[in-house]
Image (cartoon, rainbow, N blue to C red):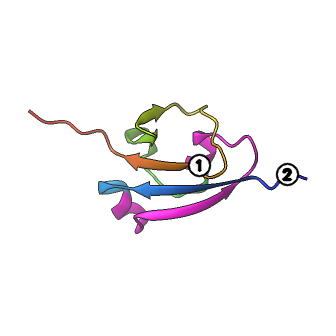
Amino acid sequence: MSKGVRVKVKIFAAPALALESRELTLELNDNATTEDLLNSISLKERNYVYIVREGIRLNPSSKLNDGDEVLIIPPIAGG
């Protein structure tokens, strides 16, 4: 029987304020994706965040692995 995946999530800027947390540890099903991760938390502005693992931006169908550490960050703009 599979045990699922445990993912550590670090949250920055406005999403951290919205979730009232800067760090979460989530237990997700095997074959969980970043979309599953976003579905498991209550983040309203989910279209305006990047999910990053090891410096690489993930897409909604990216598979997560047990022990992953991912970042939730908003896009940064400036001039």
Q: Residue furthest bottom?
A: 20
Tell me where residue 28 appears, x and y as whole percent: 69, 53
- What range is drawn magenta here? 16-39
Secondary structure of the residue carrying numbered label 2: loop
Tell me where residue 31 appears, x and y as whole percent: 73, 40
The residue closer to the viewer here, 79 or 65, is: 65
Tell me where residue 46 appears, x and y as whole percent: 45, 45
* Residue under the point 52% across and 58% down: 42
Residue 3: quarter of image? bottom right
Please identify the quadrant where the C terminus is shown. Answer: top left
The residue closer to the viewer here, 33 or 3, is: 3
Establish if 66 lies above or below 42.
Answer: above
The residue closer to the viewer here, 44 or 64, is: 64
Residue 18 on the magenta span: yes
* Nearest-to-viewer mark from 1 and 2: 2
Mark nearer the N terminus (1 vs 2) = 2
Residue that label 2 marks: 2
Q: Residue furthest left?
A: 79
Alpha carbon of mark 1 to alpha carbon of mark 2: how far?
Answer: 18 Å
The amino acid beneath tag 2 is Ser
Residue 31 on the magenta span: yes
Tell me where residue 23 appears, x and y as whole percent: 45, 64
* Residue under the point 33% across and 44% down: 74
Residue that label 1 marks: 37
* Residue under the point 64% across and 36% down: 63
